[in-house]
Image (spheres, helix red, strand yellow):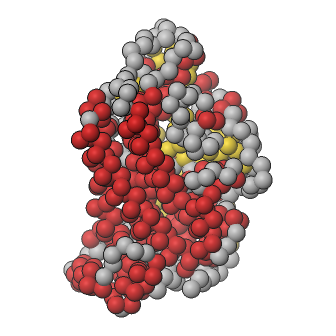
């Protein structure tokens, strides 16, 4: 049964530092009045400096550096860099295209990466914002098994659930909670209101997903060569010649089929189980504008995002009746409130990266993240944006899933503009991508029956520029490369978390996550799980620091969530 999130009468600041269960280090500062957030600052506390490292290097080497940006989504950075170089090749010579098989294989690895990332996020990074693990000890296992059978055909017996309770009980009695230690706020928090039986089911699936995500990671390595940091990409195609063999294809196919089954029979039902209890969160944590760069290009048409299966587009002011086309020339990054030298707003090709730190706790310049803007608007990117754009455009793989989830929640599309909607959209995108990846695999198998080419050899242009767009699991990713004298003259990575967790811009507009936190109720200022729910729903990734900055503040409530 859905309840109403309680709130306190607290007025004052709250600082969460570091906010974990993300990639990298993030600090969140909010002001609260009468139990609701009235102002917010999301603070990236890591400086990477990767743009400086890449200057004057061979453009073919860039992907090997950029996929070290993150320890999770390594492939998408390699793909964005490779696409940026290929776009530069295309801009220098319009005859440049990669083989169809190379597009298929890249899409297959990306599809598996998307599935893997969304499952990991829902269960291991976000679920504990909604699920009270210790409450599962109070559950009736027989009742929980019947509940599980009502929502999914996935096996979930009373005996198996009792075994989960026994493991959990051993953790608690030992004074530790194993994988759940310090993962969230223990001790009867009033903002947790799943029934014990639902908590037990979710806990069992959390543990099952640990094994499942390992299987999915192996899936990306079948063609990618290894995980993390796949090694099969080159500009002009891929080098995984064993991907042409029946044995390797069957290995990938088996993992993909198990993954699709888990998504449809476990992930989606669990999303609806949790969402049905937290319907009040359909009115909390929303933003206004949305951007999807599109993904999964058609073979032979890899340089036009408009032809991609996952359609690109821009939605302003939550207007689903109108989707504007995506135009890369409307992208600029602001540094007015970031720890960089200057006050400019520039297109990525023209940017510089000159650090200039002030102090931790500064309310004027307060983050290492820049503030990307599209057409001068603060836009959210990620699964919610992709789902909204493709739902509005009537995408045949997205629209039925959205309608299914909305029907199960007994709500209309307006509920998507929220923290709950953002969490639901990730599952919708995962299921749609899983279905499309299965279709792509069949197309690939048919294509290689007569076409074995996976790579072409083309030189790097002496002078050109190019951009590579990837709709990564966390949202729109773009790598911008300027080549002069055959070397990298300028490089900028504009990543999804920069779009979503970036600070205010030169016009004073809040970043999407800052906007989403406004008006969030807080039941206990010393345990602000509500803040974690909204921040985690964006799946932040702030990774690979050159150095870590620490600071001292005088806030009333300051604590660590470890």
Percent across and percent down for residue 504 are 66, 47
Expressed as whole percent of the image width and height from the top left, the position of residue 343 reads 67, 34
Q: Can the viewer see residue 527? A: no
165 shown above or below 54: below
Q: Up-down: is 477 above or below 427?
A: above
- At 24% from the left edge and 81% from the top edge, which residue is drawn? 163
Image quarter where the N terminus lies is: bottom right
Q: Residue at x 40, y 74 (%)?
A: 153
Q: How many marks?
A: 0
Determine which quarter of the picture holds residue 210: bottom left
On-image quarter of the C terminus: bottom left
In the depicted structure, whether residue 441 falls above or below residue 516? above
Residue lying at 35% horizontally and 26% vertically, measured from the top left = 452
Question: Could one spot residue 1 in this view of the protein?
Answer: yes
Foreground residue among 338 and 363: 338
The residue depicted at 46 percent of the width and 78 percent of the height is: 151
| Quadrant housing residue 287 | bottom right
Above or below residue 429? Residue 472 is above
In depth, the one of 515 and 469 nearer the eye is 469
Percent x, y of residue 200: 37, 81
Q: Is residue 330 left or right of residue 161?
A: right
Estimate the x, y position of residue 223 in percent, counting from the top left: 31, 38
């Amino acid at each position: 049964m859905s309840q109403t999130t309680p709130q306190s009468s607290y007025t004052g600041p709250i600082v969460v530092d570091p906010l974990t269960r993300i990639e990298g280090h993030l600090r969140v500062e909010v002001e609260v009045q009468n139990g609701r957030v009235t102002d917010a600052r999301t603070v990236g506390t890591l400086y990477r400096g990767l743009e400086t490292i890449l200057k004057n290097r061979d453009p073919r080497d860039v992907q090997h550096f950029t996929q070290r940006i993150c320890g999770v989504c390594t492939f998408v950075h390699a793909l964005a860099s490779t696409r940026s170089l290929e776009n530069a090749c295309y801009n220098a010579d319009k005859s440049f295209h990669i083989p169809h098989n190379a597009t298929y294989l890249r899409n297959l690895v990306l599809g598996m990466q998307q599935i893997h990332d969304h499952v990991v996020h829902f269960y291991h990074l976000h679920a504990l914002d909604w699920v009270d693990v210790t409450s599962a000890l109070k559950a009736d296992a027989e009742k929980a098994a019947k509940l599980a059978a009502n929502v999914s055909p996935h096996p979930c017996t009373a005996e198996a659930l009792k075994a989960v309770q026994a493991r959990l009980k051993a953790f608690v009695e030992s004074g530790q909670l194993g994988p759940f230690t310090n993962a969230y706020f223990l001790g009867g928090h009033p903002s947790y209101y799943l029934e014990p039986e639902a908590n037990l089911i979710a806990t069992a699936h959390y543990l099952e997903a640990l094994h499942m995500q390992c299987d999915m990671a192996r899936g990306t390595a079948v063609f990618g060569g290894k995980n993390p940091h796949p090694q099969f990409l080159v500009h002009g195609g891929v080098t995984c010649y064993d991907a042409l063999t029946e044995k390797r294809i069957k290995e990938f196919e088996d993992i993909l089929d198990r993954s699709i089954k888990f998504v449809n029979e476990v992930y989606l039902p669990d999303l609806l189980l949790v969402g049905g209890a937290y319907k009040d969160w359909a009115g909390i944590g929303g933003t206004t504008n949305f951007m999807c760069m599109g993904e999964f290009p058609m073979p032979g048409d890899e340089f036009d995002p408009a032809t991609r299966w996952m359609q690109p587009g821009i939605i302003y002011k939550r207007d689903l009746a109108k989707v504007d086309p995506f135009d890369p020339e409307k992208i600029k990054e602001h540094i007015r409130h970031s720890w960089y030298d200057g006050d400019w707003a520039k297109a990525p090709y023209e940017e510089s990266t000159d650090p200039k730190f002030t102090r931790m706790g500064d309310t004027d310049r307060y983050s290492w993240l820049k503030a990307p803007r599209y057409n001068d608007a603060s836009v959210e990117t990620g699964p919610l944006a992709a789902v909204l754009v493709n739902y509005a455009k009537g995408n045949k793989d997205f629209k039925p899933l959205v309608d299914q989830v909305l029907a199960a929640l007994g709500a209309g599309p307006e509920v998507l503009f929220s923290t709950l909607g953002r969490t639901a959209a990730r599952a919708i995108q995962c299921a749609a991508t899983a279905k499309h990846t299965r279709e792509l695999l069949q197309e690939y198998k048919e294509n290689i029956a007569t076409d074995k080419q996976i790579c072409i050899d083309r030189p790097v242009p002496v002078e050109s520029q190019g951009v590579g767009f990837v709709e990564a699991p966390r949202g729109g990713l773009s790598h911008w490369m300027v080549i002069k004298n055959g070397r990298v003259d300028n490089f900028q990575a504009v990543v999804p978390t920069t779009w979503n967790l970036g600070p205010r811009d030169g016009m004073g507009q809040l970043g999407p996550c800052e906007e989403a936190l406004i008006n969030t109720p807080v039941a206990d200022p010393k345990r602000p799980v509500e803040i974690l729910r909204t921040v985690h729903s964006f799946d932040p990734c702030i990774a690979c620091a050159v150095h870590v900055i620490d600071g001292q503040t005088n806030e009333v409530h300051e604590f660590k969530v470890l």
